[in-house]
Every structure is written in structure tokens, then in C-alpha cells.
Amino acid sequence: MVTPVRIASWDESAAALIDVASGRKPADVVVRSGRWVNVYSGEIIAETDIAIIAGRFAYVGPSAQHAIGPDTKIIEANGRYLMPGLCDAHMHVESGMVTATEFARAVIPHGTTSMFVDPHEIANVLGLDGVRLMHDEAAGLPVNMFVQVPGCVPSAPGLENAGASIGPADVAEAMRWPNIVGLGEMMNFPGVAASDPNMLGEIAATQRAGKTVGGHYASPDLGLPFHAYVAGGPADDHEGTRIEDAIARVRQGMRAMLRLGSAWYDVASQIKAVTERGLDPRNFILCTDDCHSGTLVNDGHMNRVVRHAIAQGLKPIIAIQMATLNTAQHFGMERELGAIAPGRRADLILTSDLATLPIELVMARGQVLAENGKLAVDIAPYAYPKNSRDTVHLGRATTGDDFVIPAPGNMASVEANVIGVIENQAPTQALVRRLPCANGRVEADVSLDVCHIAVVERHRATGRIANAFVSGFGYEKPCAIASTVAHDSHHVIVVGTSRADMAQAVNRLAEVGGGICMVSEGRELALVELPIAGLMSDERAEIVAVKAERVMQAMRACGCTLNNAFMQHSLLALVVIPELRISDIGLVDVRTFQPIPVLLPEATSSEAV
């Protein structure tokens, strides 16, 4: 097991840093003969040595022979690039379906050494206690995992019922915790724009603590509502999908966070603000937001995002700045992170190519944690307490009849509001489809790519179930997929073409304490158990990735062609991203933040059988 290196404050380590830099004391580690990726000057500086003591960089320059003693560990860079460890400026551990410890184990070999996490998923289930669990687990890791206090629990009060709530007093309390760096994404953008006292109270508590307010403006409207939101204090935003979104945010003094997650591909369109429009890249930051465990294990993490940004025409040094120095400056941590420079934490990557970014060695706080894609250490698991488990409370088993939408009168067909999935984007479309009726029930129609969708309340065993329709998954055979990962209130969300399969999948999740289950014609095709808050597994990330891939294979076997379809599935209950969503209270039009009926009123005038 690896013991995390405690990072002393500057005043505790200053004398040692100065002594090593001046040659009066030997370093703990010297990395020799590399090409220094200097994110401050934008240069690549050859024949550079680095001397490290007490987990921090003490000297960076030509020959560090003066810092080598008999016990100094020597690492030969052999002309490879010396890069700062990568930072993920905005992410949710729970999206990986693993604990913070397992998330770190998965991403360290990919070069991520600093993460800024918003645990609003576990907060929606367990409240501030869940945030404290994540905070304490993160503080014990050998890399930097900083925590933001979730600002919107629930994300849209009045439009959903979460398992817990967080308010201004909770935010003020958590701001005193040592590993808290700011307020999580302010998803209730209409509340901020309308001067909601709870939203402003949370922002005020954060600013009084001198910490960063995260943004989440998910509307395409860049008029007065956007300006009102910016005036409310959010300092960044990752919800842009267009070049005009990135430009508007930066012009208003925000940092534009460009995300590449497992299902969100928002870098290519927005990076043109830099590559084509010439905007100053210092206020652009790269992040992932949501990464599936399979992506983490098989494809990468922030190295994947940086490679993608470079492929879009960004110079490698600028892409690296967006994933290192820019992030550190944004969170007021420039003296700690984001660069290879004296006094900073010794978080370092060795790579032989800046464009393709093979991660050949990873150091954090002066310790070698990974080499050639493999962990070089083991990290002790974190023991989640009993009260973080057994969180799926349905009250009773569901049946196929729970997922019926009655047809009005004796109708042959009706028009229905339908959620339309947009591939590789978080927003949805508001569709209207004419659906057939049979035996007094409105039916899904696979020929129109329309499925049933439902949210089953799981926090208080109320038995409440909301039904609607969704399009875009492409299912062609009787099937259903249910999940207790249902951003952000995390009830059970289930999509299917068969009501019986929907009931079976939901009930299975109650049996195992949460997770993801895919059923077709009464047969269970795949299962991922997520016993911690119904969101995270206590198994290794590699095991979870295999199980999650079985879910993806099962979805494809039933006709789904979407890229990373489960991520799309899990966000259909997030009632702060336009246009249509479903919560435990019903179908919600996020353009107006109002519940709407599933069936159009005109349906009653349709021709009867």
C-alpha cells in the first residue's frame, strides 16, 4: 500500500527548498536530462534537470548535480518531455461508478494528478454526510482530489424530490473543511438569474470563504437571462456546446470549460474560439465532467482530452496549459499546482511525444505512482460505512401495469410529447410523435424509435412512478434497462419497449441495492451492482468496466446504436438541461421550467376507434 505524502505548507518547506536549490542540501529525487514543457513561457526547454524535496519542486534548470547526494533517487528522462501532471477542472467521481479511490487508481496511469470533483450525485442521496464521505476519502489519496460543495441539491426544487437537500448553512459549514475548494456547479440557473435567496446565499458563503463558484448555464439563450446569471457570481461554465457559448462566457469574465467525457463531445466546436477566432487561450480550461469506467480503464482521462484538443488544431503547449496552469489559476492554486516550477507540488509526467501523449511515468508529490500505463503502487481501499448502503426503497415490487399511460377515451392514436436524445450531447429535443393506442393504453412504437420511460421514486418508498416516452435509443426488440444512476436526484430511471421487462429490471435493482440492469424478454442480459448510495461499486475499476461493457453490449444487442448510450440514459432525469426531461413528478419542459402533460390536449379530439 502507498502512504500519501503529506504536503507541507510553504513556510514549513521553504528552508529545505532553498537549501536544495542552492546546493546546501541533497534532493530526495532528481529527474535528469528532459525537455521541460514550460506552461508559463510556452517554451520547450531542452537539457533540463529537476530536483525534488518534501514532495515539491525545488530546482528546475540546467544540471542539478549540485542537488545530488548519496541517497538521492535518480530518474533518467533521456530527452523525454517533462510535463506537469494533468488537472481535471470539473468532474463527478460517481459517473465512473467507482469510489474516489478506485477512480484515482484508474486515472493515475493516464497522468491525471489533480481533480476538482463535485460530489452532487452522492449528495442527492445522502446529503452533506455523503459529501463528507467523499471529502475524507479524497483527502487520503496520494494525488490531489479537491472537493466542491454541491450547490444544487436538489438541482431544481419543485420539479423533483431528491433524497436530501443542501442549503446556505450547509455550504457555509462545509467551506471550513480543509479539502473544500469551492461551490459546485450552480445548475439552478433560473434561480440565480431570479435572485433566489438560497442560491445567492450559497454563492455568498463561498465568496466570503474566498473560494470559487462553479457555473452550469445549460440554456442556449445568451440574452438577458445569461447576463443575469453571470452577474450572480458563477466563475466558470462547462455547459457550452457552440463556439458562441465559449466566446460569450470568456467575454463576460468566466472561464470556458470545454468538456470531453464519455458521451459529451463539446471541445471541437468551442475550441474554434481559439484556433479560428483568436481568443486568448488563458481563459479556456479542459475537463471531462462525466467519464464512464470503461472510458477510464480503456481510453484514458485528461490525456484523452488533451490529445483530442490537439487533434482539433490546438498547439500542444496551449492544450497542455488548458489542462494544467489554467486550471490551477482558476481555483487560486497556482502556487501549488499546474506547472513544473519551484515550490509547486512535484506532480510530473514523462512522455516521449506531446501530440499522442503516451504516459510513460507519473509522479505525484515526488512519488512515482505509475509507469508505462500501470500503477507502480497499490492504494488502500476506503471503507464506506453501512449508512451509505441499502438506499433503494421502492416500498413494493413494481409490475408491468405501473408503466401504463392510459389512452383518453377509445382512441386509435394520440399525440405525445416525447424526449428526443441527441447523440454526444447533454441537451435533448422536445419532440411530438403520434403513438398507437391498444386496449385503452398508449403504446411505444419501435418503428418510430419511441420507447417507454419512467422514473420510480426510491428514497422514501412513496411508490410514486412518473411515465412518459423517449426517442433516440433505437431499441428494436422487447427489452428494458433500469438504473439507480439517474442524474441528479438518482431515483430509478427505466427505459424500455416492454413493460414486463421494465418491472423486472427495476425490481432487480431493489434486490441488489442499486446499479444498472438490462433485461430482454424476461432474461437478465447484464447487471452492474452499485451498492454505495446506488451509485458506486466497491469493486475494482477494471471489474466495473467489464460489467459496464456488458451493459453496453446488451444495449447494442437490443438495437441501440448511440455512442455511450448509458450516459445518455442516466441524464434523462436531469431537469436543468433543456429541452425535455422526466423527474419523479413527471415530464418537465426545461425551457420554461414547468411540468407538462405527456399527451397533448388535442389528443382528445383525435378520431376514435
Image (spheres, helix red, strand yellow):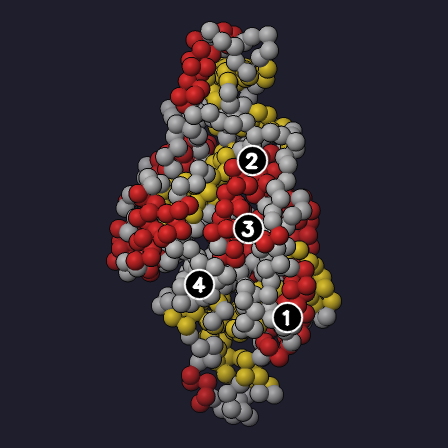
Q: Quadrant of residue 225?
A: bottom left
The residue carrying pointer 1 sits among few (fewer than 14), some (14 to 19) or many (20 or more) residues within 10 Å by Cα, namely: many
Which of the two labelled residues, at mark 1 and mark 2, occupies the earlier sequence position? 2
Q: Residue at left 38%, top 30%? A: 334
State the separation of the CA atoms marked 4 and 3.
17 Å
Q: Which residue is mark 3?
A: 95
State the separation of the CA atoms marked 1 and 2.
39 Å
The residue carrying pointer 4 sits among few (fewer than 14), some (14 to 19) or many (20 or more) residues within 10 Å by Cα, namely: many
In the depicted view, which residue is nearer to us: 363 or 161? Answer: 161
Position above or below: 58 against 326: above
The kind of secondary structure element at disc 4 is loop
Which of the two labelled residues, at mark 3 and mark 1, occupies the earlier sequence position? 3
Q: Picture coordinates of residue 333 (x, y %)?
A: 39, 32
In the depicted view, which residue is nearer to us: 297 or 511? Answer: 511
Q: Picture coordinates of residue 455 (x, y %)?
A: 54, 68
Q: Which residue is mark 2?
A: 141
